[in-house]
Image: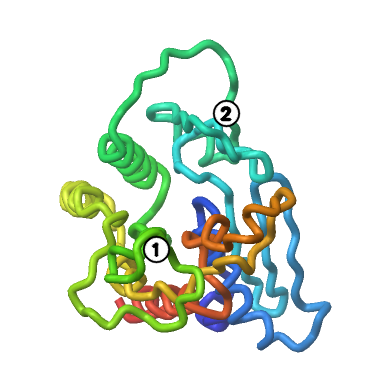
Amino acid sequence: MLESLRGKRMMYVGDSLNRGQYVSMVCLVHRLIPNESAKSMETTGSLTVFTAADYNATIEFYWAPFLLESNSDDAVIHRVSDRIVRRGSINKHGRHGSFDDEAKEIVEVSTEDAYRMAMRSMMRWARKNMDPRTTRVFFTSMSPTHAKSGDWGGEPGKNCYNETTPINNATYWGSDSRRSIMQVIGEEFGKSKYPVTLLNITQLSNYRKDAHTSIYKKQWSPLTAEQLANPVSYADCTHWCLPGLQDTWNELLFAKLFYP
């Protein structure tokens, strides 16, 4: 991977799940560079850059959770109850921008419509700003959660907490993984004039109810006595442990990147 990235720049863009995939990639490659002075990691605002000096290569992550400009663009303070995106505003992220809080008209739209809007803006931006002869663009599909144990026939009212084995039903599809979103992805990619490679991680990740960070994650505020007495109430069934599933996402990315 490092040799293939020699003289190149690789960037992950997105939210905390994309950041997890980025951290996975850095963890996979950095140990192959024994000289500590030949590698570095720096974060400035929304941008984190891992540099492999001997390879003249960087692996980067840029925080843009909705791709479009949004009120969640602060890489540290982004936990808001009402998520707002600005239509057609991907250019600001294209040059590392942020969300301005001036007066604006707010329209509530469905998840599918918002997803389609962001995808169209992303592909329009790629078509206008990227050369497909020198730049590859990948789009990662939905990362599933496992917040409802009833989905896989588990005890009602539970979630991924204390799960230690994958789901072995090959046709399993969790209730939170919207097929309508997958349909939007298929429709928009089918119309795209810029070649975008889909990294379809949804189905393979659906099986891994055992791979989440669960209760073993950083808590941003102290847990209450009630929460401590009921770990299910604060188990994180969205994000993934490392090493773990996201290493597989990167193996799939590697295959699609270098063996297209």
Q: Which residue lies furthest to the right in this view?
A: 37
Colour style of the rendered protein structure: rainbow
**Disc 2 marks which amino acid?**
Phe
Place of residue 181 in the rendered image (x, y in percent of width and height, measured from the top left)? 25, 49
> Mark 1 Cα within 10 Å, few/some/many (few <14, many 20+)?
many
Tell whether 157 sits left or right of 112.
right
Instruction: Please name the residue shown 41% across and 17% down the image.
Output: 106
Residue at horizontal 28 percent and vertical 64 percent from the top: 151
User: How crowded is the residue under tag 2: few (<14 C-alpha within 10 Å), some, or many (20+)?
Assistant: some
Total number of numbered discs in the rendering: 2
Please, what secondary structure does the residue beneath circle 1 have? loop
- Identify residue for label 2: 99
* Above-or-below relation of 204 to 135: below
223 or 92: nearer the viewer? 223
Query: Between disc 1 and disc 2, whose residue precedes?
Result: 2
Residue 94 percent across, percent down from the top left: 51, 41
Seen from the viewer's position, the closer of residues 9 and 82 is 82
Residue 197 lies in quadrant: bottom left
* Residue 48 percent across, percent down from the top left: 67, 56
Residue at (35% x, 62% y) in the render? 156
Q: Which amino acid does label 1 sit on?
A: His
Residue placed under numbered mark 1 in the picture = 146
